[in-house]
Image: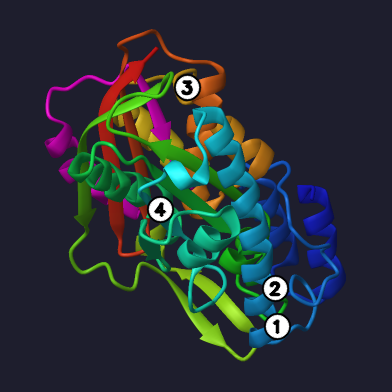
Amino acid sequence: MTTDEIADDIRTHHPDHPRLAAAVRAVAGCGVRTRFFTRPLTSPTVAGGGEVGERARTAFADALDLAAEAAEAALAGAGLAAADLGGIVTTHSTGWSVPNLDVHLMTRLGMRPTARALAHTTLACTGGTKCLIRAADMAAARPAEPVLVVAAEVISAVYHHSDTGIDAMIYKALFGDSAGAAVVSAEPLGPGFVIEDSHEHVLPDSMDHLGGRITSAGLHFDATKEGRAASRDALPPFLDWLGDRRSDFAVIHPGSPRIITDTAEALGLDAHAARHSTDTLTDEGNLGGVSVLRVLERTHEEPPAPGARGTVVAYGPGFATAALHGHWHA
């Protein structure tokens, strides 16, 4: 789905919008060129009139299919079968299901019924990073049992013509649908990022900065002016935790061009070092909780030097920060 197509859709459905020109400029300037949607733009659950139940069911079904494909690819890459796993940690915020993604995937993949399962359902953009943190804790507790991390988001479900603010117009173009997966183990199964430390932080008095709401039309996403700038406020405690540890490379959640640039500069890195985040935003959009897994995938494709120090960081509703520090194992 191209940004031009979304801009045309906005013009078609909001011809009398008092700030139509500004909305189209904002969409063009959000840093995203293309993104994937699981359904056509004209689908009732994207730009159509689908109600909350239809949107939730469709979003979860599509997320589950994407998640299963990603999980199978991650297992194949690690040389593992589903029965080898000791646990699964999932994140999914854009559909509703009880049981959630963890149990559905255990069944579809054929995992052992005794495997540990943990489902995160409202973490949004920090989801992938927090899943890696939880999986690392689980793998440390039971070193013989690898843990599968799976993130899946169908963020096209928050595309509504009833949301007419400039921010809502930007969100139509900013987000994409995707899934990603990774295997976390106590000992390396191949090249990859070795987790040495983790960080979680919630910015005080920031509950209303970013968040979701549900109406009869479905799930909506909102951000305040403070929320759009909160990543800068979250940097001081993040940098305090990092201390004097250097970062030769970074996996930065591509929430926006500003988030990528501010975080890279804070880590002492240039635009080239942040290219995997920028390329993800440009080619696929903000993928919510999946984003860091996609940026990690790009990092695998063009790996850092053996032993290079690296940092993973994501920001999301709360206003929350989740981060990892470690090194690249070749």
Residue on which the image places disc 1: 54
Depth check, mark 3 against mark 4: the one in front is: 4
- Which portion, as a residue range, is magenta? 229-256
Q: Pinpoint residue 254: horizontal percent, then vertical percent.
A: 49, 42
**SS for callout 4:** strand
Depth check, mark 3 against mark 2: the one in front is: 2
Residue on which the image places disc 4: 88
Q: Pinpoint residue 229: horizontal percent, then vertical percent.
A: 37, 53
| On-image quarter of the C terminus | top left
Spatial CA distance of label 3 from label 4 is 34 Å
Q: Pinpoint residue 231: horizontal percent, then vertical percent.
A: 33, 49
User: In this view, which residue lies farthest toward the bottom?
Assistant: 216
Q: Identify whether 135 is placed above or below 207.
A: above
Residue type, numbered disc 2: Thr
**SS for callout 1:** helix
Q: Are marks 2 and 1 in contact (CB under 8 Å)?
A: yes
Depth check, mark 4 against mark 1: the one in front is: 4
Q: Residues within 10 Å of mark 3 (few under 14, many from 20)?
A: few
Residue type, numbered disc 1: Glu
Depth check, mark 3 against mark 1: the one in front is: 1
User: In this view, which residue lies farthest toward the top?
Assistant: 305
The quadrant in which residue 61 appears is bottom right
Q: Residues within 10 Å of mark 2 (few under 14, many from 20)?
A: many
Instruction: Write the residue at 54% across / 66% down.
Output: 104
Q: Is residue 58 magenta?
A: no
Disc sitting over residue 58 in the figure: 2
Residue on which the image places disc 3: 271
